[in-house]
Image (cartoon, grey):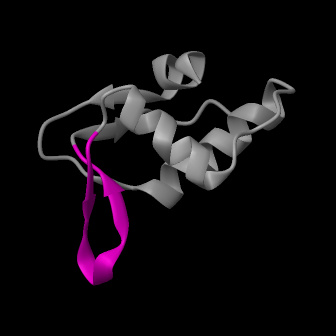
Amino acid sequence: MENFLNENIRTVKFSNIPAKEIYERYLKYCEMHSVKPLTFILFNKEMVKFGFGKCRGTRGILQFKDVYLLKCKY
């Protein structure tokens, strides 16, 4: 998880990304690195453990706060 975050995520104030979008990138990362992915629920818990805050965006969609996804390498 830590390697995924280092390669794909940066902290940027006022930039919220839907949790589903980050998780989909995580699944691609796991596939490329032959890593068994966490479930969506466990992934969200790990994101919180790494210090990312959660909020509800438009239409109640779960988002992580102050997160920016780097350009996808895969």
Q: Position of residue 37 (x, y in %)?
A: 75, 39
> Residue at left 12%, top 46%?
14
63 up-or-down from 1: above or below = below
> Residue at left 21%, top 40%?
66
> Residue at left 25%, top 69%?
57
- Hey, which quadrant is residue 72 in on the image? top right
Farthest residue toward the right? 34
61 drawn magenta? yes
Farthest residue toward the bottom? 59
Q: Quarter holding the N terminus?
A: top right
Farthest residue toward the left? 14
Q: Quarter holding the C terminus?
A: top right
Q: Is residue 22 left or right of residue 55?
A: right
4 up-or-down from 22: above or below = above
Nearer to the camera, 74 or 17? 17
40 up-or-down from 26: above or below = below
The tally of labels here is 0
Q: Position of residue 39 (x, y in %)?
A: 69, 49
The span shown in magenta is 53-65
Nearer to the camera, 35 or 69? 35
Q: Is residue 28 left or right of residue 63?
A: right
Q: Position of residue 70 (x, y in %)?
A: 43, 32
> Residue at left 50%, top 56%?
21
